[in-house]
Amino acid sequence: MAQKADVERIPPGSKVELYISPTCPYCRAAMQHYDDAGTPYIVHDAQNDRGARAKMFSYTGGDPTVPAIVVDGTYVQSGWGSPPSG
């Protein structure tokens, strides 16, 4: 189950991981937001990397929606925007 957190306002020093599809516009929007905010993040290609996809599914309970956002090892949400889309 996802934790309630504000994915647009990540506390400084947090480890942000994004499980993405390279062609996903919501994934690009999330990465652009974190770039603009100066928030470092790690990208995992869940579309083309089977290991990354399996790890994403372990966080999301099998939900294939991207981006899947993990902060400090805790799954926060899948999708981007309000309401999240992906």
Image (cartoon, rainbow, N blue to C red):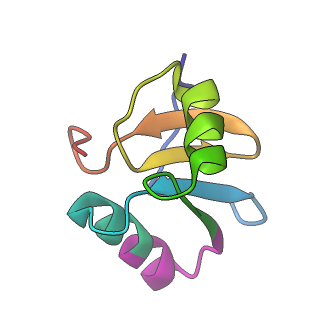
Q: Is residue 26 visible?
A: yes
Q: At which x and y percent is residue 41?
A: 63, 69
Q: Is residue 10 visible?
A: no
Position of the N terminus, as image quadrant, is: top right
What kind of secondary structure does the magenta stretch mostly adopt? helix
Q: At which x and y percent is residue 29?
A: 30, 68
Dividing the picture into quadrants, the one containing residue 76 is top right
Front residue of this view, candidates 38 and 27? 27
Q: At which x and y percent is residue 6?
A: 48, 44
Is 25 located above or below residue 18 in the figure? below
Judged left or right of residue 35, residue 32 is: left
The region drawn magenta spans 32-41
Front residue of this view, candidates 24 and 5? 24
The residue positioned 25% from the left and 50% from the top of the image is 81
Is 4 located above or below residue 27 in the figure? above
The residue positioned 65% from the left and 75% from the top of the image is 40
The residue positioned 31% from the left and 50% from the top of the image is 80
